[in-house]
Amino acid sequence: MTVKAQIVEMIDFIPDGELPILLEVVKRFLPKDADDVATDDDRESHLIAMQEYMCGATIAHDAVDWDS
């Protein structure tokens, strides 16, 4: 398992009250000149997608027929 995958798995065990601190730490590792900025619409879309995922309302990548 990659380090990134391990970090992603561990996130679920962090108490919600500690997540803002972790977010600030992670932000410090992002390049200052990165032009990938999440807009309010991006964040809303992500929230909706995560809610659908948590409810099992998504389709597995392997279940999609990408050739049609």
Image: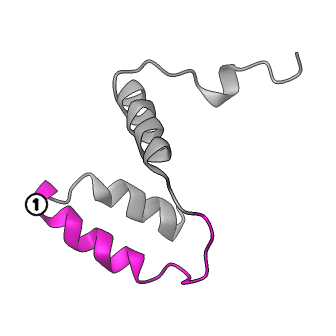
Position of residue 20 relative to residue 50, above or below, is: below
- Name the residue located 57 percent from the left edge and 21 percent from the top edge: 59
The answer to if 35 sits in the magenta stretch is: yes
Q: Quadrant of residue 23?
A: bottom left
Could you tell me residue 61's position as x and y percent? 65, 29
Q: Residue at x 47, y 42 (%)?
A: 41
Residue underneath mark 1: 17
Asked if the magenta segment contains residue 45, the reply would be no
Q: What is the total number of numbered labels drawn onto the structure image?
A: 1
Tell me the element at label 1.
helix
Above/below status of 54 relative to 56: below
Q: Quadrant of the C terminus?
A: top right
Q: Is residue 22 left or right of residue 43?
A: left
Q: Is residue 66 above or below residue 34?
A: above
* Outermost right residue: 67
The image position of residue 17, as x and y in percent, is 10, 60
The coloring applied to the image is one colour
Percent across and percent down for residue 7 are 39, 64
Q: Is residue 38 left or right of residue 8?
A: right
Q: Determine which quarter of the picture holds residue 35.
A: bottom right
The residues colored magenta run: 15-36
Q: Quadrant of residue 25?
A: bottom left
Amino acid type at circle 1 is Gly
Instruction: Identify the residue at horizontal 15%, vertical 55% (top origin).
Output: 16
Q: Is residue 5 shown left or right of residue 26?
A: right
Residue 29: percent from left, percent from top: 46, 82
Q: Residues within 10 Å of mark 1 (few under 14, many from 20)?
A: few
